[in-house]
Amino acid sequence: MKRQLEIDILTIFPEVVRGPLSESIIGRAVSGGIIELKVHDLRKWSLDRHHKVDDEPYGGGPGMVMKPEPFFSAVRELRRKETRVVLMTPQGRRLQQSMARDYAGNCSHLVILCGHYEGIDHRVVEALVDDEISIGDYVLTNGAVAAAVFVDSVTRLIPGVLGDERSSQEESFAHDEGILEAPCYTRPVEFEGMEVPEILLSGHHEKIAEWKRNRALERTAENRPDLLADDEGGSDSDN
Ligand code: ADE
């Protein structure tokens, strides 16, 4: 299959990104050539004798800030006309399935910058970055973990990556409606006194579909009531 997406990731912890993306479905997409993934050590672009990539913050404050020079050199080397440059940061837009779909469908080359420490010199954001993305409202120790999550969410939506395309069409957030998936079961029918709901064994497709929809709504009301609210809340349907 023809290569569909090329991804360059810039981080000072390459192994953190490589690990999760070298196994299972994404690992096979890479080895099968559907996506091309290159994970670079940002220190390669540091001009400093000791490959330093951070420095103290102007204006004071705790921690260190990532210097602009390595990012500028790296992006200038890697960027092409069609490239989209993404920065993983808790200050970004919160990742939604619709964003993953947009990248999977409309992007052929991604350069992903991973922040570490307290943050990254803002001139990088202003001059180089097209999209700042957060994977959720919490702070991780480094953006490499977030980059692996983002790449996984995008890559699995590329045609040919999942064995069965229905998986990505039926799952939570896949539809405009944006509700969670119904619970699922497999063998055995009875396990430690707990039984698989009888309707799933009935072979009655319409009734099963109705059951799934009701359970999906119940689960959404319990775990993610924000998705059912009328306002824009956390729903994915409007972006
Ligand atoms: N880096 C640290 N925390 C992050 C988050 N929540 N999303 C993206 N990058 C991050």
Image (cartoon, helix red, strand yellow):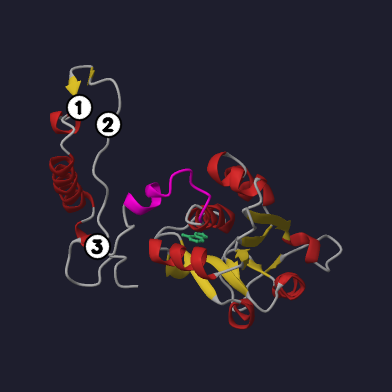
Which residue lies at the image location 42% right of the left edge and 63% below the top edge? 95
Amino acid marked by disc 2: Tyr
Q: Position of residue 9 (x, y in %)?
A: 65, 60
Say which quarter of the image contains residue 64.
bottom right
* Magenta span contains residue 165: yes
Seen at 39% across and 61% down, the residue is: 97
Label 3 CA crowd tier, 10 Å (few <14, some 14–19, many 20+): some
Pointer 2 local density, CA inside 10 Å: few below 14, some 14–19, many at least 20: few
Picture layout, residue 25 above or below residue 55 = above
* Residue at image location 23% in from the left, 61% down from the top: 227
Q: Is residue 82 left or right of residue 218?
A: right
Circles 1 and 2: CB atoms closer than 8 Å:
yes
Q: Earlier in the sequence, mark 1 or mark 2?
A: 2
Q: Looking at the image, which is closer to me, 27 or 2?
A: 2
Q: Give the residue at mark 3.
A: 177
Whether the residue under disc 2 has CB within 8 Å of ligand 1: no
* Residue 28, image x, y percentages: 60, 43
Which numbered disc, 2 or 3, marks the residue that appears first in the sequence? 3
For residue 160, side relative to residue 226 (left or right): right
Identify which amino acid the numbered label 1 is placed on.
Val
Side (left or right) of 21 relative to 71: left
Q: Is residue 90 visible?
A: no
* SS for dot 3: loop
Q: Quadrant of residue 54?
A: bottom right
Determine whether the residue tagged by mark 1 lies in a helix, strand or loop.
loop
Disc 3 marks a residue whose amino acid type is: Glu
Disc 2 target residue: 185
Please give the range of residues in magenta. Answer: 159-170
Query: Could you tell me which secondary element the residue under label 2 belongs to?
Result: loop
